[in-house]
Amino acid sequence: MGRGRVELKRIENKINRQVTFPKRRNGLLKKAYELSVLCDAEVALIIFSSRGKLYEFGSAGTTKTLERYQHCCYNAQDSNGALSETQSWYQEMSKLKAKFEALQRTQRHLLGEDLGPLSVKELQQLEKQLECSLSLARQRKTQLMMEQVEELRRKERQLGDINRQLKRKLDAEGSNSNNYRAMQQITWAAGTVVDEGAAAYHMQQQQQQHPNHSAAMDCEPTLQIGYPHQFAAPDQAANNIPRSSGPGGENNFMLGWVL
């Protein structure tokens, strides 16, 4: 009779478990070796007993096989990550493209183009959007105009202040100029009075020092130019000309037309 099928479960008897482990281990190592030889496969086998003892087999070396395994796993992960990222970017691009097309349609509708496929409800919504946009544009225009008016008023006030300052400055300069002219006139008048006084004083001193000379000067004939003040009219000049003769009997008066 053949052997019956053994049920795979943990052997509860510790002794039986310890006896079964080396048999199964050796058979597994033998199968791994046969697989590597018969099929030219790179096989690595690592076994830890219940006590923590290590048993290993590697057709090309356990370390080399493990490095190759890690390299293949990492490359697979990178490939899967790159593929996933590519798919994510493709989905994002599809969403953006659909959004862009929707915005283009909305823009054409706002410009009054491609209105044929729209229903009455969609046209009403479009009308509300246009009215809202127009209201916002008007509000913004009014705000800008008010800001410009306020700016012009501010500049007007500044120019008014500058104008008043310049006017006060000109008034002050004009007052200073008038004061300067008045001082010049006073100084000139004072100088004239002083000169006249000095001349009179000098003449008085000469008269006191030379009385005879002063009398002689009074007796000397004088030369008069122009018409005398007692002439009433030019036609009376010939009859009313006063005459005085000097020591030599000569007339000392010159007619008014003689220069």
Image: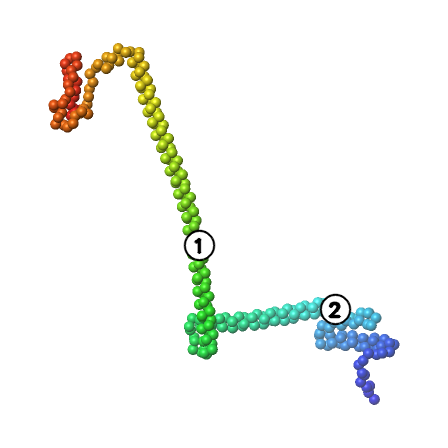
Write the residue at 29% across / 11% down.
Answer: 210
Amino acid on which disc 2 is placed = Thr
The answer to which of marks 2 and 1 sits earlier in the sequence is 2
Q: Which residue is mark 2?
A: 62
Quarter of the figure with residue 213: top left
Q: Position of residue 249 (x, y in %)?
A: 14, 14
Q: Which residue is mark 1?
A: 151
Which quadrant: the C terminus? top left
Of circles 2 and 1, the one toward us is 1
Q: Position of residue 208 (x, y in %)?
A: 30, 12
In the image, residue 177 above or below residue 241 = below
Question: Which secondary structure, mark 1?
Answer: helix
Side (left or right) of 171 relative to 242: right
Which quadrant: the N terminus? bottom right
Res 177 label: none
Write the residue at 81% across / 77% down.
Answer: 24
**Front one among 186 and 244:** 244
**Front one among 130 and 215:** 215
Side (left or right) of 229 relative to 47: left
Q: Position of residue 224 (x, y in %)?
A: 19, 21
Side (left or right) of 49 relative to 126: right
Quarter of the figure with residue 90: bottom right
Whole-angstrom CA distance, mark 2 to mark 1, is: 86 Å
* Number of on-image labels: 2
User: Outermost residue, right direction?
Assistant: 15
Quarter of the figure with residue 42: bottom right
Callout 1 environment at 10 Å: few (<14), some (14 to 19), or many (20+)? few
Residue 48 showing in the rendered view = yes
Amino acid on which disc 1 is placed = Glu
Residue 16 showing in the rendered view = no
Write the residue at 64% across / 68% down.
Answer: 78
Callout 2 environment at 10 Å: few (<14), some (14 to 19), or many (20+)? some
